[in-house]
Amino acid sequence: MVIGSHQRVLASGKEEINVEMSGKSITRVHKVKSLGLLIDEHLTWKDHVDETVKKISKAIGALKRVRPFISVKTALQIYHALIPPYFDYCSSVWGECSVTLCDKLQKLQNRPARVITRSGYDVRAKHLLISLRLDNLTKRRKKLKATLMFKILNGLAPDYLQDLFSIRTTKYNVRNLEMKLNLPKPNTNSKEVLATVWPHDGTTYPTIYVRSNRLDLLKKK
């Protein structure tokens, strides 16, 4: 699979790119599944989101069928067991997908909120999530990413993740440098490429969340 934006592929002058290794032609694929993450060649994450939507829709259907026979508390427990794991899985990788895909997932989260509370569409989904003490998906992904960065900065993550980041330092007395990170750059020399999915300035989430020195407090923010 050749990874790049659609525009860059077109700019190369040909839609199909032939790849050879040791004199043998490598069959090109346009998407591949690795550890449950569906990666497409343009990194749009549309295929992964579409597959996630199918899985979550089945879980919502199961919740809807049992809802008449259970309490709100039990319905919420079933929700937490069946649905958020699909939203959360590898979200630090694909979470910067398009607004359209993010909205699609958010509408999907709104559905079980209506099922649990037995509310119609005359009630705003935002109010239902608040009543159930559920974060919207954008906030949830930020918390998960911040938690991951906290673990990396405090030696709680695997070495292969900790080695990717370092605290930015300078000999100059500049403002707003606290907890800013040097982000890893793509490595094309060793035939491995690292895609950076953190905000472009590399500081947004660590600056907002990672100043806490306790992980339990971090998750409650």
Image (tube, helix red, strand yellow):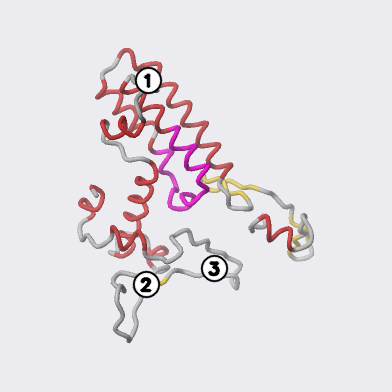
Magenta segment:
85-108
Question: Looking at this rendering, what residue extends furthest in the bottom direction?
Answer: 171
Q: Are marks 1 and 2 in contact (CB under 8 Å)?
A: no
Q: Residues within 10 Å of mark 3 (few under 14, many from 20)?
A: few
In percent of width and height, residue 134 lies at: 30, 36
Residue 105 part of the magenta-drawn span: yes
For mark 2, what is the residue?
166
Q: Residue at x 34, y 82 (%)?
A: 170
Magenta span has 114? no
The residue to which callout 1 is attached is: 120
Mark 1 closeness class: few <14, some 14–19, many ≥20 residues within 10 Å: few
In three-dimensional space, the C-alpha distance between marks 1 and 2, rounded to whole angstroms, equals 49 Å
Query: Is 170 placed above or below 38 here?
Result: below
Kind of residue at disc 3? Pro
Name the residue type under label 1: Gly
Mark closer to the chain start, 1 or 2: 1
Vertical arrangement, residue 198 with respect to residue 72, above or below: below
Q: Residue at x 37, y 72 (%)?
A: 166
Vertical relation: 84 (above or below) 216: above
Q: Quadrant of residue 17?
A: bottom right
Q: Which residue is mark 3?
A: 186
Corner quadrant of residue 153: bottom left
The numbered mark, 1 or 3, whose residue comes first in the sequence reads 1
**Who's the residue at 31% across and 30% down the image?**
128
